[in-house]
Amino acid sequence: MRDVLEAVADGEFSPAAAEARLSGYVTTAAGRFDAAREHRRGAPEGILAAGKTPAEVAALAAAALESTGRALVTRAGEDDVAAVAEIVDAEIDVAVDLDHDERARTLVARTDRFEPPSIDATVGVVTGGTADAAAAGEAKTVLDAMGATVERVDDVGVAHLGRVLDHLELLREADVLVVAAGREGALPTVVAGLVDTPVVGLPISTGYGHGGDGEAALAGLLQSCTVLSVVNVDAGFVAGTQAGLIARAIAAARE
Amino acid sequence: MRDVLEAVADGEFSPAAAEARLSGYVTTAAGRFDAAREHRRGAPEGILAAGKTPAEVAALAAAALESTGRALVTRAGEDDVAAVAEIVDAEIDVAVDLDHDERARTLVARTDRFEPPSIDATVGVVTGGTADAAAAGEAKTVLDAMGATVERVDDVGVAHLGRVLDHLELLREADVLVVAAGREGALPTVVAGLVDTPVVGLPISTGYGHGGDGEAALAGLLQSCTVLSVVNVDAGFVAGTQAGLIARAIAAARE
Amino acid sequence: MRDVLEAVADGEFSPAAAEARLSGYVTTAAGRFDAAREHRRGAPEGILAAGKTPAEVAALAAAALESTGRALVTRAGEDDVAAVAEIVDAEIDVAVDLDHDERARTLVARTDRFEPPSIDATVGVVTGGTADAAAAGEAKTVLDAMGATVERVDDVGVAHLGRVLDHLELLREADVLVVAAGREGALPTVVAGLVDTPVVGLPISTGYGHGGDGEAALAGLLQSCTVLSVVNVDAGFVAGTQAGLIARAIAAARE
Amino acid sequence: MRDVLEAVADGEFSPAAAEARLSGYVTTAAGRFDAAREHRRGAPEGILAAGKTPAEVAALAAAALESTGRALVTRAGEDDVAAVAEIVDAEIDVAVDLDHDERARTLVARTDRFEPPSIDATVGVVTGGTADAAAAGEAKTVLDAMGATVERVDDVGVAHLGRVLDHLELLREADVLVVAAGREGALPTVVAGLVDTPVVGLPISTGYGHGGDGEAALAGLLQSCTVLSVVNVDAGFVAGTQAGLIARAIAAARE
Amino acid sequence: MRDVLEAVADGEFSPAAAEARLSGYVTTAAGRFDAAREHRRGAPEGILAAGKTPAEVAALAAAALESTGRALVTRAGEDDVAAVAEIVDAEIDVAVDLDHDERARTLVARTDRFEPPSIDATVGVVTGGTADAAAAGEAKTVLDAMGATVERVDDVGVAHLGRVLDHLELLREADVLVVAAGREGALPTVVAGLVDTPVVGLPISTGYGHGGDGEAALAGLLQSCTVLSVVNVDAGFVAGTQAGLIARAIAAARE
Amino acid sequence: MRDVLEAVADGEFSPAAAEARLSGYVTTAAGRFDAAREHRRGAPEGILAAGKTPAEVAALAAAALESTGRALVTRAGEDDVAAVAEIVDAEIDVAVDLDHDERARTLVARTDRFEPPSIDATVGVVTGGTADAAAAGEAKTVLDAMGATVERVDDVGVAHLGRVLDHLELLREADVLVVAAGREGALPTVVAGLVDTPVVGLPISTGYGHGGDGEAALAGLLQSCTVLSVVNVDAGFVAGTQAGLIARAIAAARE
Amino acid sequence: MRDVLEAVADGEFSPAAAEARLSGYVTTAAGRFDAAREHRRGAPEGILAAGKTPAEVAALAAAALESTGRALVTRAGEDDVAAVAEIVDAEIDVAVDLDHDERARTLVARTDRFEPPSIDATVGVVTGGTADAAAAGEAKTVLDAMGATVERVDDVGVAHLGRVLDHLELLREADVLVVAAGREGALPTVVAGLVDTPVVGLPISTGYGHGGDGEAALAGLLQSCTVLSVVNVDAGFVAGTQAGLIARAIAAARE
Amino acid sequence: MRDVLEAVADGEFSPAAAEARLSGYVTTAAGRFDAAREHRRGAPEGILAAGKTPAEVAALAAAALESTGRALVTRAGEDDVAAVAEIVDAEIDVAVDLDHDERARTLVARTDRFEPPSIDATVGVVTGGTADAAAAGEAKTVLDAMGATVERVDDVGVAHLGRVLDHLELLREADVLVVAAGREGALPTVVAGLVDTPVVGLPISTGYGHGGDGEAALAGLLQSCTVLSVVNVDAGFVAGTQAGLIARAIAAARE
């Protein structure tokens, strides 16, 4: 502890970094940032912009940058991206790289001192239709941040079985698969029946009428006659992180 | 009307048959039997035993036999079958053939004067697993009663795609398909993506936990990314009759 | 395959048409268009605009036009129609006819080389009230595209039985019926009790309070004491296509 | 109050009758009987046997007999009937008439001093099928107890419109109608579209699968495109009493 | 029929009025208006503006004015009111009185030849809170149109029992009561326990969280331990009409 | 820790009591008993018999007796009571008093060395009807075990307001109230509008049809227009313990 | 009563204050204000702005100020705040202090004669994340108004247990706790397992997909394996008032 | 193929084994056994006894034994176990070892030639309470069958945090965790916040009232503020197999 406090005194550590080191989290007006999560959980904490003001998102992103060198924001609107850019300009005194994926609605900020992790494992991210792109993109963003290799296989819905069978080899070679599907959610079941890889099913809130908003897809994945596990509707960040934790364990065993 | 009343006077028509001829239904203590349905709808009325006492089932079956020469009972338990057998012995004075399918829980009674219809069309009845047998059997019973040719393709669930692909030719040759499926209900979607035949999806109340009791299957069929129409959970009689009406229209066009 | 590649080399086939011919689908930035569906399923693939950007809708419509000579868009807003018109101008080098039905929210584009199919069968499309017009119009659009004769019978809700009884003859003469109904959804049951034609029930998301959003109508159709099959709430495209597949089978038998 | 206490002292009033007169209810070990309800509400309190032990049912029935001269038990099983018969023998010292309707599962007990009310109004009780008999019988029992004239019209479901149209005159002549219906619950809507009488819709817990247990019927009645009011699923006692209150108001106006 | 056609020829009857007289409904581009409903049902048909365009509302209102001399629009926005005013100016050649209640969102149009009905009966319309005003106003509008006397008792929620007890006499003197309530919906139960008048419960879509949107109130009314009947959430028009039909039957008996 | 181990060596402490003292829980084959709960939470842990075998219930009860001198079992059937009696005879070597409330389905066992706590505060336990007795009895059992004074006010449902107003003084004098109610759950709202005491609402699984199984009561309590907090349906043990914790805090402040 | 009327005559009492004194409520065009609630219930009535127009909110606030010297508005938008400020300027002739908390969306108005209550008790208000701030702020506002001491512990969600364990002492020292939580709602259970204080759980409408809108949190709190009571989703005012009533009872016992 | 047929001719292969080798499944009267699943998926197919007759279970088990040397039955009752034992005696001519876990309701049959797989990885199976034992046992059975090392940590529910913190080291050392929890389902969230291992959450159908039958636990796991994936309620077999697939991938990487 003495070391940390001396580093603060020397200006080597920001107070945020020091608090993170000592208690595991950073307290801001907008909430506490769980700076120890990556160390404890092996995956970065995401800042869910939905339900927060841009100012709150920016304050938490700054705390993340100061304490861990990186910030990962999901469901980020244009306002959120602008607020983070502004606070980075104003308050962070090292160079920061901002990476905004509009379709996935994610923002990744990294200081130039940040050393990205790398995992020797491949995760396949599969979608059934055009409307699954946002959640699948969220999964890809967090997998990139965790250092895994990501392979996308898009728009291979079961209405035309040929589309998925054409990509079977790629699906079989991945270490773990995230398979997204809206409507009736049959794709993860069909894929999981064809491979011996762990499959994380990601139901998507497409569809209308009865079972819309992803409820039919979720129920279908939970009832799947093959073996897979599931995350909540549109929870691309969770699906990606879970696949990343599995990939990380496999990569660790490879070493 | 005079003819009918004279036929009753002559003992040629039972009062039940006469009432059926004149008003379209037969009134019994257990309810009114819709004797004109077959003429009006092209499909026999079924007597749903569930929710009725064996005595009520038997009374309605007797009215059906007297007015139309045939009775079709669904969800029939042993008690219902016994009660029908007893009333046939006691009250029907022509020979009656009883056909009881234990697995489908159906009972078909026919007087020896009854001339069964015949339809020049084939209906495929497809199941995904062992537990779909009862509802599929109900569909087969009513299709047999309507005179269609029935082809069964059993236990071809999508967990192993090979099972359904092995029967593709037979699926493509049928005039109309009833496809049953419980759990996540992916089979009708996969089948309907492979054929140009009308598909009637029949969700089955297998499965447990969230989406159990056939609700996941029903929602999945309603959300199907291919084209099919649906009946209620376990409604084998309805699926079969609907497929039979389609087959009947095709057969009529063939003449 | 050699033929196809040579046709591409000769400029007779676009690369899109060639891919469609060889693998059954066309890959675009906005997703894969299932170009083989009409051949495989006997009904055109629809492009559901809801949940896609106008640019994605236009890209898929262009792929459809290039590979099959026709594009059918449902739930199309003004933006989608404009985007399709623009891409047709810019990228399609044959004359294209655009047919936009505002009330049904459908758009059909056809190149002048496209030869529309024709089916010798009649489908009745019946509504219970003014608010059912959009979904019924969607059904009519796809039935027109499949070449069936469509008869509309509008606003014959059961609150006044006379309205439906006045059209009984027309209902009985159709080969197959699509019957739409919102609120309590009684109309398809009443109609199906009067005719021997197959009826596809189409629940509509009118109504408010408990059972609103079409849920009461859907549940009522599934519980119908007559025989009919059902599609999801507001699924006019599915109801129309299913009726079209039945009409097509009847027409084929007529030949 | 003095009068009441003196009547107790003279043995003219039982303590139960006196408590009922003074505070409006009778306290027993099994609960409080609302003896003033008939005076206050114009309709007798029913003792719902479901959820009570036979001993509790009997104790409340005895309190009802002692304080009002009559007891009305609904959802009564054989055990409940036996327990009431026993307590009547043991504790009630005037002659009591017991009237048990097995199908309706109701029991009405009356002392020989009880003077039944009479209402100059007619209530029609209409059912769609055999399975509606229990709830309709419950409605009839309470209407009889209130003194109304009851007309039953049974098994006139809308699958065959002729059945209901054949009874139109009787439906139009009633002062108020209770219309029961299970499955999709279309009958009350059809009836209410044909008459200018107030209709109380009574959904029944028939049906299976999605919308079973009377939920489709209830939702359909609440969404009815005609005008009617509704009671809970299988609530025959409530429907009958509500119709009885309306009939009673009409009869009072006739005087 | 000859009379009607001659009256059309003489310009005494509009074609709309003649169609209404002959077939019971008027066909417009916006749907069919059930002109015979008031005669058949004893209550005017309402035109529900929600889900219709202002032009459709206006067309139906004009048909109603032409065939019955009156139009009653519910859930009417400013656009709907303007469209009706415009069509009245343009197409109706007798003087028309427009009565728009902003809070209730109702519009009543009457030609100066229209003779309003009158009923010798009183209906109490009771609310539990400020937010119940719109639905209660809808009930009052239709009751006024049916000619009943309406007594309003507002904002007497059960959180302070004194408020409702202070108005007990008025509640007891009405011939029938409409009692609205949102949140937990306890008011109709409390009122129905205090009076011997028929009570129609009207659940209101106030409340938030679990059981919000009026679902808790509806469920509570259906489970009421007193006797009442219920309409759908916010269905003020239905509650008012049902109460009006009861009041009309009482008034008829008074004559 | 040394003390505890020496006490075990001396036979003064059972191993179970020692484990409880050292780690806060006792490990048995049937699970871990949270022996420290009473110390940590101020309320005894209850053993929920539902979902456990009688042998598991008995093993946990023995662990509770050994480590804390008391065991409190809820939802106890006859088999559970017998199994506890047997294990007490066989394995507990001090005298144990067993108190079984059949109606509440609770069992309390106490060694003769156990010194029951006492709280200087009164909790009112109020029910709306006979069917609320089991859950209210569960609440009373745990309140007795916590040492509070319990006042029961039974069967004061709002269908007859007089019943609850007659007991107003007693309700106002309690320190905290548990108010149970099934069906529409109006009683806790009415009571909470009349007193300034904290009210814990306890919904009961009476009622049938829509909103049955206590769901209407729960939703109604959550939507209450007065102030109260709620526990789950039939959770008499939780309601009682929560009221006991409040009473305990008040009593502590009194000292 | 004479006293009150004389005070009105003397101008000492406004008519509103006099009506409040005599009948317990004040009648305005916008509804009745329950002026006696604070006296009767020990907590001020809140004016829920949601579902009311700004004019209605202002009218009720003025009635509250005139009759009780204070008004407390929840879910207040900018329009509501402006309307109250305007009516205070125009109609209230004593000085009024307005306190608007934007995040909590509450407004408290107090005349300068108003003497705020004070309670000798502490309530902890705990949140799991940034998004719980609005409801927690609502709870704090009403607790402040009741005169309790409030301790906030923010953003201590269970994803990082250290955050909550770091504040254990403060949690244990409070007299009563309000614990808010969205998503899976685990925080109140974890907190209630660590303290012997009564805990009121406050579920928050964060979260998305299945169980979103606070439904998962509510269900989790109702199923909690520890002891706590619950209010509806986002019902910060109710949670705060309930905790305030408990705190008030404890403080009264302290005197 | 010739090889296989020759092996059949030589009696080396049973016809079942040959069919399995050639088409991947074995056809029996009771359905088709997916004999290739273990090869294709890396995990054995389970025979779900629920919904099948004992005879059907036995027929499928025999097919499994003949084609793969092992059968794994879940949700097996005593009847199922007896039927398998009988068919093994009668039809399988090599020695078979039967392993029946009564609590987990699983049955594993192995011929003496069967060589069990072994995986160099550890899976922790964690439960929150006694009632989670059956599903956790099902997970353990399939993990044993896949050859993984299984560590059980039982009854560490969050009501007493000490119980789970005491086992933290073991939780952190496992390669993957299955964490079961009923009621509010907080345990998997708390565990997943403490470790960097992939966690598969297994909701259990304990609990009563609102959110009972495992629905609260499932919704809570889907909403978890940490990262985990989920299987359906009570789906111990699926959770175990999914964990086994992950463990198998890690073990493969270790080689």
Image (cartoon, coloured by chain):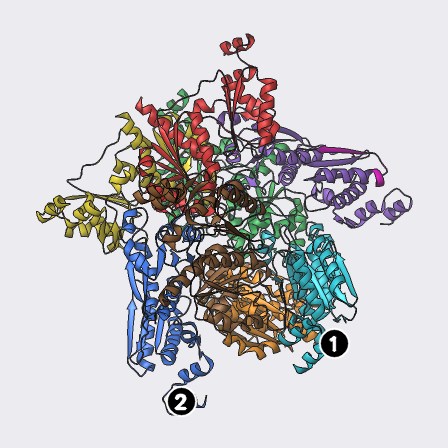
Chain colours: A yellow, B purple, C green, D cyan, E orange, F brown, G blue, H red
Q: Tell me where residue G42 appears, x and y as whole percent.
A: 40, 72
Q: Nearer the viewer, mark 2 or mark 1?
A: 1
Which one is nearer the viewer's eye here, H162 or A140?
H162
Residue at image point 36% right, 58% down: G197
Which one is nearer the viewer's eye here, G236 or C111?
G236
Badge 1 marks a residue whose secondary structure is loop
Amino acid type, callout 2: Val
Badge 2 marks a residue whose secondary structure is helix
Which one is nearer the viewer's eye here, F9 or A88?
F9
**Residue A201 magenta:** no
From this view, report whether residue E188 is shown above or below residue A17: below
**Residue B96 magenta:** yes
Q: Please indicate, yes or no, whether residue D126 appears anywhere in the rendered image.
A: no
Mark number displayed over residue G8: 2
Q: Residue furthest left?
A: A10
Amino acid type, callout 1: Glu
Q: How many marks?
A: 2
Distance from the alpha carbon under mark 2 to that under mark 1: 55 Å
Q: Tell me where residue D35 appears, x and y as whole percent.
A: 66, 70
From this view, report whether residue G63 is shown above or below residue H207: below
Q: Tell me where residue F190 appears, x and y as whole percent.
A: 50, 68
Left of D7 or right of it: where is A241? Answer: left
Mark 1 burial class by Cα count in 10 Å: few <14, some 14-19, many 20+:
few
Mark number displayed over residue H204: none
Left of G138 or right of it: where is F215? Answer: right
Where is mark 1, residue-wise?
D12
Chain under disc 2:
G
Mark 2 burial class by Cα count in 10 Å: few <14, some 14-19, many 20+:
some
Are dots 2 and 1 on a single chain? no
Q: Which residues are magenta?
A: B89-100
Q: Tell me where residue D26 appears, x and y as whole percent.
A: 64, 69
Q: Residue furthest right?
A: B10
